[in-house]
Image: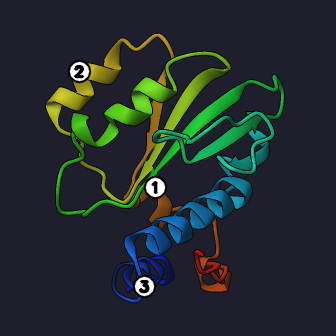
Amino acid sequence: MTALERLLDDFMFRTESEADRDQKFEELIKEFLRTDEEWEGKFDHVWSWDEWPEHEGTGDGIDLVAREHDTEDLVAVLCAFHDPSKSFTKPDIDPFLTASNKPPFTARLVVATTDTWNEELEIAIKDEKIPVKRVGLTQMLDSSVDWAQYQPKAVAAAG
């Protein structure tokens, strides 16, 4: 088992709630986008939805907002902690597609713990006006990030 697989296993089986797991996964993806060789030069900033200075209300599926280094264009990011043995489906992504299909976003990125997308979803994103890129589990496992050094942040208790 790799260091990333151990982290994901901990998120799945050793978190207090689904919200705790999802928040930890979002933090992990922020670290991935900030440090992976493929992504670190692309973005000059990655915020959680609530940290992003222009956020209004809930993200409705947008978990992170990344600003492209060269253009300052904004990328909406969905962090999907999903069963890797199951296909990612259109209903899994619909709220994100709706919320991110307008300015100020010029691109979208889905980072999921599965590599498999069903055909309906593939067709749905094919001709989107705002393009949708994806990163799956295999890409994260093959990334340049030293996951053994990653320490999840403690999640503050709600209330």
Where does the image place residue 95, in percent across and percent down from the top left?
38, 34
The crowd level at tag 1 (other Cα within 10 Å; few <14, some 14-19, many 20+) is some
Residue found at x 15% / y 31%? 119
Q: CA distance from mark 1 to mark 2?
A: 22 Å
Q: CA distance from mark 2 to mark 3?
A: 36 Å
Please tell me in which quadrant of the rendered image residue 150 appears.
Answer: bottom right
Q: Quadrant of the N terminus?
A: bottom left
Residue found at x 33% / y 18%? 126
- The residue labelled by disc 3 is 16
Mark 2 falls on what kind of element? helix
Q: Residue furthest front?
A: 159
- The residue labelled by disc 1 is 139
Q: Is residue 16 left or right of residue 100?
A: left
Mark 3 falls on what kind of element? loop
Q: Amino acid at mark 1?
A: Gln
Q: Is residue 115 left or right of residue 135?
A: left
- The residue labelled by disc 2 is 123
Q: Amino acid at mark 2?
A: Ile
